[in-house]
Amino acid sequence: MSDKSLQPSGGPGRPKDPAKRLAILEAAKRLFIQNGYDGSSMDAIAAEAGVSKLTVYSHFTDKETLFACAVESKCAEQLPPLFFELGPEDSIEQTLLAIGRGFNALINSEESLAMHRLMVAQGAQNPQLSQLFFNVGPQRVIDAMQRLLEQANARAQLQIDNPQHAAEHFFCLVKGGCHFRLLMGVAQPLGRQEAEEHVQEVVRLFVRAYRP
């Protein structure tokens, strides 16, 4: 049998269906969180998404690529790239508040907490997978924040000697003690008002520390 018989009927150049891609991503996020990386097969993800396994492979080359895209998609839901743009009339305080709110909601969501616990468990067994998760998730967020702080530096809105360290400090402040307690399962998420007060306090502290 020729290999061509295994190709989709429209051939490799056929436009891919974005709705199917989204369905695959959503299915992958659910199953990776429920069953872990090793417990989530491409067959199971295809069945969950309601597509063929061939369709999954046509959108995502392999399981590692699908996992990376699922993590990236989850981050983009709460922290779209526009959050990290400092417009000509934007104040650094308002920009940091938008980022802080999005990041706080992201890391304390049930999906994110489950993924975090999964990656901690995978750290000893599959460090390559944990590194992949870090590169496409946390590292991208830190890099985007670093570029934003460099912009703020150039405009003299802030004075920061090491923007990379400052970016990490900001996100660690937003995480605070609440995130750690949630990971341990010994606390409930903050209410909307408490979460807003927490983010505002973090932004005040951060801007005070780096104000020119």
Image (cartoon, grey):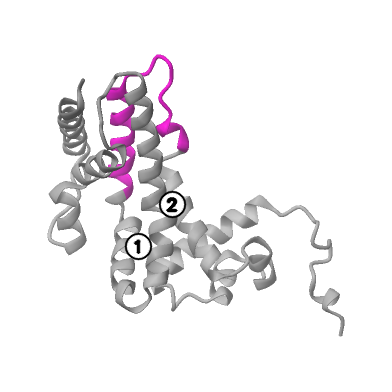
Chain-order first, disc 2 or disc 1: 2
Residue at x-position 17% and y-position 56%:
180
Label 2: which residue?
74
Residue at x-position 28% and y-position 68%:
120
**Numbered-mark total:** 2
* Quadrant of image for the C terminus: top left
Compared with 146, 91 (above or below) is above
Q: Which residues are magenta?
A: 81-106
Task: Locate residue 204 relative to residue 148 in the image: left or right.
Answer: left
Compared with 15, 62 (above or below) is below
Compared with 78, 150 (above or below) is above
Query: x, y (%) of residue 193?
Result: 19, 34
Query: x, y (%) of residue 74?
Result: 43, 51
Q: For residue 101: magenta? A: yes
Task: Locate residue 4 relative to residue 105 in the image: left or right.
Answer: right
* Res 206 → quadrant: top left
Label 1 sits on what residue type?
Met
Label 2 sits on what residue type?
Lys
CB atoms of marks 2 and 1 within 8 Å: yes
Query: x, y (%) of residue 79?
Result: 40, 41
Packing grade of label 1 (10 A; few <14, some 14-19, many >=20) is: many
* Res 155 → quadrant: top left
Packing grade of label 2 (10 A; few <14, some 14-19, many >=20) is: some
* Res 60 → quadrant: bottom right
Residue 75's tag is none
Residue 128 vs residue 42, the one in the foreground: 128
As drawn, which residue projects farthest toward the top? 89
Q: For residue 197: magenta? A: no
Residue at x-position 29% and y-position 20%:
157
Label 1: which residue?
115
Compared with 46, 86 (above or below) is above
Helix, strand or loop at label 2? It is helix
